[in-house]
């Protein structure tokens, strides 16, 4: 199946067209044959001199060498010109004669035996016409035999997170800081999604380096092998979301609790995806003492189920140990209890063993829970969750007791969280 021709307008072209004294001018489009893509690369100013279009270096494809074609641009050459473009685009293969097109666009050059390219601009489209998908910028391939409508993509004025401002409260989340503890496969995915949702800053905490065996499950790639995970994540997020700020902390939260404790009050929420029981408990304790909400994310039962647990401050909600004790007391299971039994009777702790998709699914949900918690709590927006404890089926039913008895792959069940135990030193400090 062949690709349809397409025109790309870098922002520099659009700004120059809109600010030009006249209503028309010449331009040069470079055709990239492998992509069947036309990129405006030069523009004629009022003096007639052609200037090179500024195409940012990161748009590598748009800077490829290709075949140059002469073109023209016109600002509203006739009424409803771009509505005619819409009608043609909706009927693949349709065209108008060059003679008809000349009545729509007076001043268009006769292409002779070559191909001409034309951009028409109609800034006076109504809201109704825009809703009908009429384009402000329309492209045309012009020959003596026929004129065909082609799509035009315009580089927007604002790139990145500001593009989401009409659909998502990026301005509010930009005020927030989340401490992400553990930058393994789950924590890395969570940190990436927090940045993508507009969280202003993350404090990323992990003592380890990114090694070869991590790559298969991680959002980081081989470029970062050998680096500290916190530094690699700062680079990764900075490349993708430059407005996001990252404070890297290469430390173990258990061994360096004295270093971590002063950083906790700088956060609005803690997301712990550490691979191990001890760091999860440490961060649950520190969050509760600092009156901060926290989100715990992990996989259990050898990667068969995922868990996202929200622990909120206040007298109604217990800590991680309270939740585990409540499950055991109610006849359920504590999924971590057998890892604490005396040597020779318990199970050796296993790292988070699951395929990348499952680990990222848990991390993504944890990030969503974190954002929802901040929006509803700190920012007072209606963004409630079905519960406090999400259990996600990652493999077929495994015969576990409630609440881990998810029956199907992809099933998510939500549950409540236990209140504080009277003797809990985390929830009821002396």
Image: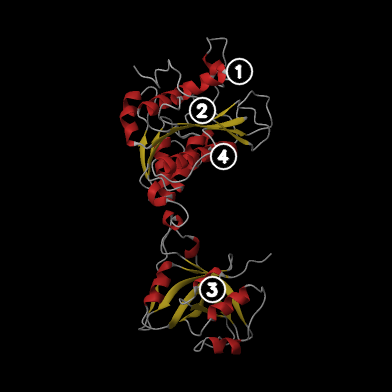
Q: Earlier in the sequence, mark 1 or mark 3?
A: 3
Q: Nearer the viewer, residue 163 or 191?
A: 163
Horizontally, residue 290 falls left or right of residue 316, namely left
Q: Which secondary structure, mark 1? A: loop
Q: How far apart are the alpha carbons under marks 4 and 3? A: 39 Å
Label 3 vs 2, first from the N-terminus = 3
Looking at the picture, tell me which residue is in the foreground, 417 or 135.
417
- Mark 4, Cα crowd under 10 Å, few <14 / some 14-19 / many 20+, is some
Asked if disc 1 and disc 3 are in contact, CB closer than 8 Å, the reply is: no
Residue for point 55% across, 36% down: 362
Whole-angstrom CA distance, mark 1 to mark 3, is 62 Å
Residues at circles 4 and 2 in contact by the CB criterion of under 8 Å: no
Residue placed farthest to the left in the image? Answer: 262
Q: Which residue is mark 4?
A: 361
**First in sequence: mark 4 vs mark 1:** 1
Nearer the observer: mark 4 or 2; the answer is: 2
From the top left corner, tell me how far across and down residue 89 is, in percent: 61, 73
Q: Nearer the viewer, residue 116 or 322?
A: 322
Location of mark 2 (residue): 417
Q: Secondary structure at mark 3?
A: helix
Q: Which mark is residue 129?
A: 3
Q: Is residue 162 above or below residue 28?
A: above
The residue identified by callout 1 is: 331
Q: CA distance from mark 3 to mark 2?
A: 51 Å
């Amino acid at each position: 199946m062949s690709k349809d021709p397409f025109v790309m307008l870098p922002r520099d072209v659009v700004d120059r067209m809109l600010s030009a004294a006249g209503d028309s001018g010449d331009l040069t489009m470079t055709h990239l044959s492998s992509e069947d893509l036309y990129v405006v690369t030069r523009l004629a100013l009022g003096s007639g001199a052609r200037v090179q279009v500024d195409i940012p270096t990161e748009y590598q494809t748009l800077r490829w060498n290709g075949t140059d074609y002469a073109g023209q641009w016109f600002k509203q050459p006739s009424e409803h010109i771009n509505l005619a473009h819409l009608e043609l685009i909706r009927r693949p293969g349709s065209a108008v004669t060059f003679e008809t097109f000349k009545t729509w666009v007076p001043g268009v050059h006769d292409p002779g035996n070559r191909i001409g390219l034309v951009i028409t601009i109609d800034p006076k489209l109504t809201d109704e016409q825009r809703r009908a998908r009429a384009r402000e910028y329309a492209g045309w391939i012009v020959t003596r035999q026929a004129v065909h409508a082609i799509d035009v993509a315009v580089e927007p004025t604002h790139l990145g997170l500001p593009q989401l401002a009409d659909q998502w409260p990026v301005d509010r989340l930009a005020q927030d800081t989340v401490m992400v503890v553990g930058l393994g496969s789950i924590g890395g995915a969570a940190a990436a999604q927090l940045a993508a949702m507009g969280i202003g800053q993350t404090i990323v905490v992990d003592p380890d380096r990114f090694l070869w065996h991590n790559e298969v499950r991680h959002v980081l790639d081989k470029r970062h092998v050998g680096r500290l995970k916190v530094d690699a994540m700062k680079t990764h997020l900075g490349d993708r979301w430059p407005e996001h700020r990252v404070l890297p902390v290469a430390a173990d939260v258990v061994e360096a609790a004295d270093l971590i404790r002063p950083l906790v009050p700088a956060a609005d929420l803690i997301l712990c995806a550490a691979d191990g029981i001890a760091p999860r408990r440490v961060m649950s304790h520190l969050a509760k003492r600092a009156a901060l909400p926290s989100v715990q994310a992990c996989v259990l039962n050898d990667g068969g189920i995922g868990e996202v647990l929200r622990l909120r401050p206040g007298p109604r909600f217990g800590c991680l140990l309270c939740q585990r004790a409540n499950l055991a007391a109610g006849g359920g299971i504590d999924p971590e209890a057998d890892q604490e039994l005396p040597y020779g009777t318990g199970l050796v702790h296993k790292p988070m063993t699951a395929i990348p998709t499952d680990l990222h699914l848990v991390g993504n949900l944890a990030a969503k829970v974190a954002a929802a918690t901040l929006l509803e709590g700190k920012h007072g927006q209606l963004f409630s969750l079905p519960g406090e404890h999400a259990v996600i089926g990652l493999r077929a039913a495994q015969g576990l007791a409630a609440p881990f008895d998810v029956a199907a792959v992809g099933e998510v069940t939500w549950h409540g969280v236990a209140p504080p135990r009277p003797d809990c030193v985390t929830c009821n400090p002396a």
